[in-house]
Image: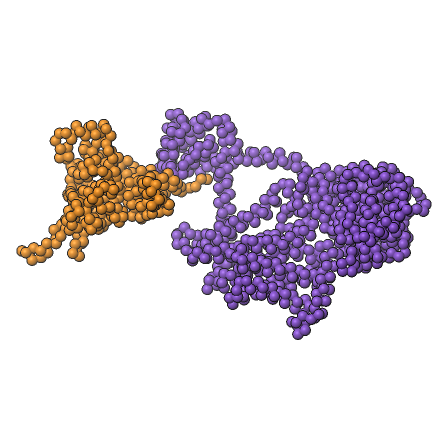
Chain colours: A purple, B orange
């Protein structure tokens, strides 16, 4: 097999290894087969064209044609006549597969269920990367640059997954790329001629005899090892390839703030609602007689008919929710204080925002959960809700007052609110006109907001439908909904938030849950159960003096309720923030339940949740304080070299080697900064030392005695060896050397003796080198038969 | 034509050292009576004698090269021959020639000048390369082959050759192969003013050289050589010799490094030096002290080094300062 063909194979293996990084974003693994097939097509085409001597410029073209043919045959083969000739049906089939893939991507968060369309998209993408790597590494002969197309495969999951891609896919991808480099390196060396095999007796038997290859492998292993280990060892770097703490996709930019790269919560919401099965997510008990919505996070930027969230930022130390959450300065007026204890169902919910009611003041949960003030979100860059079992929320919910809202002026919107939530949006002309019509004649912003809400919620033309009106090609999605009037909470919340902005009112979309279904346990205690069907989105608008208040434009949704303060009709029991919506009462009635969820049973029994701490299963909070650990570690590090020196000295003199005095002398000299010449014999070294440092007569004589004894020990015949106790001589020379050294050098000689540090470095280095040798040998043993075959 | 015989008794090194020091001291004093102010050159000549090697004395005319060779020869009571190398000298003058004897009607071998314990080759680089090479076999193998018959040379056998620097006119530079056969090369150098003044006094009278009496015979020298052979060399020192010689082969300034023969001769010379110091084991210091004299004349500098006026001696010095001493037990 020629070197070009080997390179082609190596490129294919590298792509296949890097492809494994995609597996966390897809549910199941059946998609891998077709993607591996795409890689195989590119590799086989490459090997064949190179073997047949096809011109270089044609090789990628042929591979591309074969790849397209493969994808067509595998995915839309049944629409082609004779199995190979595309027909008009093929185009339609491709279009529908494309739509399917789009639908998949938009509606699901990872792990995404893989439809036929998404499988095609993935196989095409992987095939394209394989083609690019082949082009760069083999045709253009730049294996190092082929890391860039490989990086694409790693970039997709690292952008989509909130916790990054993790260590294993990175290491696999790196191994593939290094393998490619290795093959390319051997090709480059091969151009210089046949490598000479060393016949020296010093050459290690059984090892790989190409020292160039060894060096290359060592550099590679060291580089990848450093990339994995250094961030792991470095405190303060959140994004690690191995170990915990990898939740956030990067450390904070400034001021030590953490951030979490949000994937769109809307896709999570859609995933919940699309799933027709009611999956219980969590249960809670609350002292609030009429629980309101439970928030997760908010979406603040709008583009192309969809709201999305920007990055969340918070100080990991100052913003811990377990230490309390400062009340919002906007919220004046009456508040309702209550406590809510939440028990999450085992691993049912896997998100980085904690569901909390409006107005949380304190949440007893792991310290990694922090408060983001702007979006009023409790989030964790390191943990997911599946790491949490129970938590307790203390809340003080503002009770918006219709009269206050009526007079709320929007003249003095704070800068931080204005900057994010009052930015004008680019919307279709239709939306602008509609908004103008709806708010026409309203005098206050509050009235405008209520009018927009009522336009949806109290308008029989709008229907609640999980199959929302689909936009025609080229049509604005929002316009399609406003005209089709079919949709669910996402569309209604989106539309109202957009229209609020158009009307000049700061707005955003909140994502969370409706209060859930009230359940009564067999012992008579009540709790609320929240399932995937309670997932909800709703708009929030900002008013001076009250802050963010929620609206409810979605008609007929189960559990949804129009806030009382937005109702023009007098509401019985004024002060109660919510009026149950028409459909809310239908299911919210208490009903006995046979089995009690285990989490809620614990809460009801007072085992968990009620206690201030230990409400999570995280071990992060139970470790000793870093303020205690740091000085201890520092003290150990400070004393370590000194202790090592003492131990070495003791062990050294214990075995009475005739060379011990000289070794001790060399160390003592090194410690006071004397540089020994490797080419000096003991006699010459002693002469150089006594001429370089004025030691005084007794020490000089002691030095000569040590040198003479060392000479005899090293060079005289064994029968001439004599046992001499030179420890006193060594001590004499050491004190003479130290007497001449400056104080700082003497201090260093005691605390951080350079000789000990050097010894530690060399022993560590030689040990590492031995490990590397062993790795080299085993790699060589594995690859030798392969290479031998390749040479033949 | 005397068969080379081994010394009768292989003296133990410890016991023989006193004998060695005494005999060597006598020879040294004797030679220094005529070569004043050059103890290190005299010592090197002795080292080469005891190391069973050959000495090349190189310097400008008139500094006492021939005097040293003759003084050494006179101090030893053994056969000494002197060859004055000239451009018309023939190889047979060196090795000997077979002459037809009319009476016996046979060819009879008339030994050349090389058949002696000590051969003084004066101005060796004035002879043609052909004649120079005639010495080759004799020096290395201690035998001479004429007309297919091999004649062994008597031990000890030492060639002390003098030559003028190759830049001088009318010289044929010694080929590398021949230079390699000399154990050491030494430069006499000009004497110090004081030594030169003494020399004027001494040499003003009757010829000092003629007054020299032999202080040792061939048998003694053979015994001394045997004692030197018994001097202990540790593995570390052997390793060091190899490292040093290997370094000359890898030095970027050198076109030709030292040969394995050089390692052998460096070690032998180091043994002799240790013995002359009264030690029965070799130190790296002995090796370092002799490396310049033993290695420098065998090396060929590169064109760049020649342009930069780097002498091979300075390259060897640099290597001595650079090549680390091997250690049996690395730092614990």
Could one spot residue A274 in this view of the protein?
Answer: yes
Q: In the rendered view, would you say B71 is above or below A787?
A: above
Residue B231 picture location, percent across and down: 29, 41
Q: Is residue A611 left or right of residue A706?
A: right
Q: Residue furthest left?
A: B103
Residue at 83% x, 49% y is A499
Residue at 12% x, 54% y is B98
Q: Where is residue B283, by image quadrant?
A: top left
Q: Is residue B52 left or right of residue A644?
A: left
Residue A569 picture location, percent across and down: 94, 47
Q: How many marks?
A: 0
Residue at 7% x, 58% y is B105
Most foreground residue, A455 or A105: A455
Residue at 77% x, 38% y is A415
Most foreground residue, B28 or A546: A546
Q: Where is residue A197, by image quadrant?
A: bottom left
Q: Is residue A307 left or right of residue A2?
A: right
Could one spot residue A584 in this view of the protein?
Answer: no
Q: In the rendered view, would you say A748 is above or below A198?
A: above
Residue A684 picture location, percent across and down: 36, 34
Residue A714 picture location, percent across and down: 37, 39
């Amino acid at each position: 097999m020629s070197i070009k063909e080997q390179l082609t194979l190596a490129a294919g293996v590298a792509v296949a290894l890097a492809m494994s990084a995609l597996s966390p974003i897809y549910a199941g693994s059946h998609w891998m087969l077709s993607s591996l097939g795409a890689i195989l097509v590119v590799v086989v085409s490459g090997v064949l064209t190179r073997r047949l001597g096809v011109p270089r410029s044609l090789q990628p073209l042929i591979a591309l044609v074969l790849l397209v043919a493969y994808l067509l045959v595998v995915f839309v083969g049944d629409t082609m006549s004779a199995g190979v000739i595309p027909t008009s049906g093929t185009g339609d089939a491709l279009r529908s597969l494309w739509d399917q893939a789009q639908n998949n991507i938009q509606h699901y968060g990872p792990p995404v269920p893989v439809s036929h369309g998404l499988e095609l998209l993935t196989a095409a993408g992987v095939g394209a990367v394989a083609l690019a790597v082949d082009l760069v590494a083999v045709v253009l002969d730049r294996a190092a640059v082929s890391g860039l197309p490989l990086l694409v495969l790693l970039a997709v999951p690292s952008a989509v997954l909130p916790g990054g891609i993790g260590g294993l896919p990175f290491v696999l991808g790196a191994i593939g790329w290094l393998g490619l480099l290795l093959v390319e390196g051997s090709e480059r060396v091969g151009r210089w001629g046949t490598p000479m095999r060393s016949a020296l007796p010093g050459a290690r038997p059984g090892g790989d005899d190409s020292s160039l290859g060894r060096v290359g492998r060592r550099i590679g292993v060291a580089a990848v090892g450093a990339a994995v280990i250094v961030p792991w060892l470095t405190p303060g770097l959140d994004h690690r390839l191995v170990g915990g703490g990898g939740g956030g996709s990067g450390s904070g930019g400034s001021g030590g703030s953490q951030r979490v790269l949000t994937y769109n919560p809307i896709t999570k919401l859609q995933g919940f609602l699309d799933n027709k099965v009611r999956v219980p997510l969590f249960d809670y008990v609350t002292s609030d007689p009429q629980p309101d919505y439970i928030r997760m996070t908010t979406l603040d930027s709008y583009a192309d008919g969809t709201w999305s969230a920007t990055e969340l930022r918070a100080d990991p130390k100052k913003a811990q929710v377990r230490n309390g959450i400062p009340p919002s300065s906007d919220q004046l007026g009456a508040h309702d204080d209550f406590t809510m204890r939440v028990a999450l169902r085992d691993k049912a919910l896997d998100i980085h925002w904690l569901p909390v009611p409006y107005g949380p003041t304190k949440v007893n949960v792991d310290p990694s959960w922090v408060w983001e003030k702007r979006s009023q979100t409790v989030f964790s860059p390191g943990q997911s809700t599946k790491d949490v079992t129970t938590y307790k929320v203390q809340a003080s919910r503002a009770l918006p007052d219709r009269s206050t809202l009526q007079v709320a002026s929007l003249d003095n919107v704070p800068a931080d609110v204005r900057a994010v939530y009052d930015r004008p949006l680019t919307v279709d002309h239709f939306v602008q006109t509609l908004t103008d019509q709806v708010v026409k004649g309203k005098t206050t912003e509050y009235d405008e907001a209520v009018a927009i809400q009522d336009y949806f919620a109290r308008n029989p033309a709008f229907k609640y439908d999980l199959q929302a009106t689909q936009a025609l090609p080229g049509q604005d999605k929002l316009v399609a909904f406003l005209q089709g009037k079919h949709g669910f909470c996402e569309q209604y919340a989106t539309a109202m938030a957009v229209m609020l902005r158009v009307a000049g009112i700061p707005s955003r979309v909140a994502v969370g849950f409706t209060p859930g279904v009230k359940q009564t346990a067999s012992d008579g205690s009540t709790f609320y159960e929240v399932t995937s069907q309670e997932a909800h989105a709703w708009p929030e608008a900002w008013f001076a003096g009250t802050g963010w208040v929620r609206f409810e434009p979605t008609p007929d949704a189960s559990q949804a309720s129009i806030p009382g303060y937005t109702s023009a009709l007098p509401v019985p029991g004024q002060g109660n923030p919510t009026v149950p919506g028409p459909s809310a009462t239908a299911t919210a009635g208490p009903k006995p339940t046979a089995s009690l969820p285990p989490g809620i049973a614990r809460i009801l029994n007072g085992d968990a949740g009620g206690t201030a701490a230990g409400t999570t299963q995280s071990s992060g909070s139970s470790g000793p304080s870093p303020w205690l650990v740091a000085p201890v570690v520092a003290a150990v590090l400070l004393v370590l070299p000194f202790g090592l020196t003492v131990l070495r000295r003791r062990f050294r003199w214990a075995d009475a080697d005739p060379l011990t005095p000289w070794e001790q002398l060399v160390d003592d000299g090194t410690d006071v900064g004397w540089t020994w010449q490797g080419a000096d014999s003991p006699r010459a070294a002693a002469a150089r030392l006594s001429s370089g440092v004025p030691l005084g007569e007794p020490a000089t004589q002691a030095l000569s005695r040590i040198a003479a004894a060392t000479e005899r020990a090293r060079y005289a015949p064994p029968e001439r060896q004599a046992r001499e106790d030179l420890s006193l001589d060594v001590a004499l020379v050491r004190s003479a050397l130290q007497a001449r050294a400056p104080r700082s050098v003497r201090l260093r000689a005691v605390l951080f003796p350079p000789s000990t540090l050097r010894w530690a470095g060399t022993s560590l280095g030689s040990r590492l080198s031995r490990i590397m040798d062993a790795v080299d040998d085993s790699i060589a043993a594995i690859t030798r038969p392969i290479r031998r075959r390749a040479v033949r | 034509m005397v068969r080379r015989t081994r010394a009768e008794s292989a003296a133990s090194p410890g016991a023989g050292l006193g004998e060695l020091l005494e005999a060597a001291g006598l020879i040294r004093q004797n030679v220094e009576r005529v070569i004043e102010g050059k103890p290190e050159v005299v010592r090197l000549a002795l080292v080469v004698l005891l190391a069973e090697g050959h000495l090349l004395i190189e310097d400008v005319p008139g500094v006492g090269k021939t005097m040293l060779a003759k003084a050494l020869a006179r101090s030893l009571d053994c056969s000494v021959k002197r060859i004055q190398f000239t451009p018309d000298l023939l190889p047979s003058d060196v090795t000997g020639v077979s002459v037809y004897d009319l009476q016996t009607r046979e060819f009879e071998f008339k030994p050349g000048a090389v058949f002696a314990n000590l051969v003084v080759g004066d101005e060796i680089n004035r002879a043609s390369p052909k004649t120079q090479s005639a010495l080759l076999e004799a020096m290395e193998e201690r035998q001479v082959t004429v007309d297919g018959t091999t004649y062994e040379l008597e031990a000890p056998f030492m060639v002390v050759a003098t030559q003028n620097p190759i830049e001088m006119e009318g010289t044929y530079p010694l080929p590398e192969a021949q230079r390699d056969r000399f154990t050491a090369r030494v430069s006499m150098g000009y004497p110090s003013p004081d030594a030169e003044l003494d020399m004027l006094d001494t040499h003003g009278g009757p010829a000092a050289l003629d007054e020299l009496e032999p202080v040792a015979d061939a048998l003694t020298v053979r015994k001394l050589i045997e004692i030197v052979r018994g001097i202990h060399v540790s593995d570390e020192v052997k390793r060091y010799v190899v490292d040093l010689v290997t370094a000359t082969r890898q030095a970027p300034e050198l076109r030709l490094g030292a040969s394995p023969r050089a390692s052998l001769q460096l070690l032998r010379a180091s043994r002799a030096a240790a013995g002359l110091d009264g030690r029965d084991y070799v130190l790296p210091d002995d090796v370092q002290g002799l490396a310049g004299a033993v290695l420098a004349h065998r090396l060929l500098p590169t064109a760049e080094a020649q342009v930069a006026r780097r002498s091979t001696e300075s390259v060897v010095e640099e290597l001595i300062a650079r090549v680390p001493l091997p250690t049996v037990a690395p730092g614990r």
